Amino acid sequence: MSSLPSLVGKVAVVTGASRGIGKGIATVLGEQGASVYVTGRTTAATPNATSGTINEVAETITASGGVGIAVPCDHADDAQIKALFERVKAEQGHLDILVNNATTLGPDPFAPPPFWTKSLAISKQFTVGLRSAFVASYYAAPLMIAANKSLLVNISYYGAVSYHLDPAYGATKAGLDKLTFDMAQDFEPYGVAVISLWPGPTATERAKALVSELPGGDNILENSETPKFSGLVIASLYADPKLMSKSGNVVIAAEAALEYGFADSNGKQPASLREQKGSPRSFFKKG
C-alpha cells in the first residue's frame, strides 16, 4: 500500500509502550493521527537502564500530529489497569484499538538453558504478559463494543509453537494465542476483532544492547524488523474491510506486510519465519 489510512478521531491504548515494539506501535498509530494512551512504568530516565519513557513517547506522538497521552501503569496491578480504562471511558467514551504488549522477561532472559538455572523472575511473564492481557481486555471490552469498529491485538511470537528462551516464555505466548481465539468467539457478535500478532526478531533497544555482543550480532540486527513494523501491520489490519474474517487467528507480521503491500520503515521486506520456527496452531470452535 502506498500510504497508511488516517486514524484521526480514533483512540488507541498500547500497553508497555515506553520502548521496544510497544513504542514502535504507539508511534505509528500516533503518526496516523490517533489519540494514543501510552502505558508503562517508566516515567523518568534512570542510569544504566534501557532508554525510553512513556512521557517521551507521548510527546513524540503529539509532535507527529497525533495525541499522545502518557499513563503510568503497573500491569501487575489490576486496580491500575481498571483505572486506566476508566480514564479512557471518561475522556473518550470508546476505544478503537487495544494492543496488549506489556510483558516482563526478568533479569537474564538470554541466559542459556536449562530454565532452573535462571532467575525465578522469568515466571513473572505469567502475570505481566499473559494475565495482564486478559485483565486489560476485560476492562476494555465495553469501550471496544461502544466503538463502531475495534481491534484487539495480543503481541505474541513464534515461541508459542517452538522453543525460545525458556518454558515460561513459550507458555506465555501459547497462552496469548489461545486467549486470542477464545476472546474472538465472545467478541464476534459485537464486531470486535481479536488478533494475535507474531513479529519477527526485532531491533529493539534491549535487543541492540544484548545481541550486538553476540557473535554475528550486528548481522542479526541488520536483518531484524524495526519496532515500527508491527505498528504498520496493526494500522493496516484496522483498515482492512475484511478484518473480522481474521479474528481469532494468528497473523505473522511479515506475511501481513506482503498481503497489504508495504515494507518496513527502513525499506526492507522482512521474511516470514514460518518454515524455521513453526506455524500457528489450529483451534476448534465449540459445537
Image: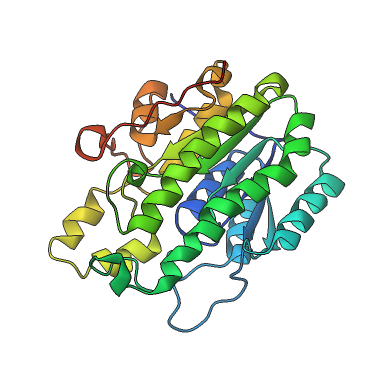
In the image, 41 versus 120, the foreground residue is 120
Residue at 43% across, 82% down: 48
Q: Determine which quarter of the picture holds residue 128.
A: bottom right
Spot the residue most to the bottom.
Answer: 47
Q: Position of residue 101 (x, y in %)?
A: 53, 51
In the image, 253 versus 5, the foreground residue is 253
On-image quarter of the N terminus: top left
Instruction: Look at the image and tell me whether residue 164 can be seen.
Output: yes
Instruction: Look at the image and tell me whether residue 64 can be seen.
Output: no
Q: Position of residue 209 (x, y in %)?
A: 31, 69
> How is colour applied across the structure in the image?
rainbow
Q: Determine which quarter of the picture holds residue 108.
A: bottom left
Q: Reply above or below: 69 against 65.
A: below
Q: Reply above or below: 87 against 106.
A: above
In the image, 125 versus 219, the foreground residue is 125
Q: How many marks?
A: 0
Q: Position of residue 110 (x, y in %)?
A: 29, 66
Spot the residue most to the right.
Answer: 90
Residue at 49% across, 36% down: 178
Spot the residue most to the front.
Answer: 287
Residue at 69% across, 25% down: 149
Q: Position of residue 275 (x, y in %)?
A: 21, 33
Tell me if 220 is positioned left or right of 225 in this view. left
On-image quarter of the C terminus: top right
Tell me if 108 is positioned left or right of 220 in this view. right
Tell me if 74 is positioned left or right of 165 in this view. right
Tell me if 280 is positioned left or right of 29 in this view. left
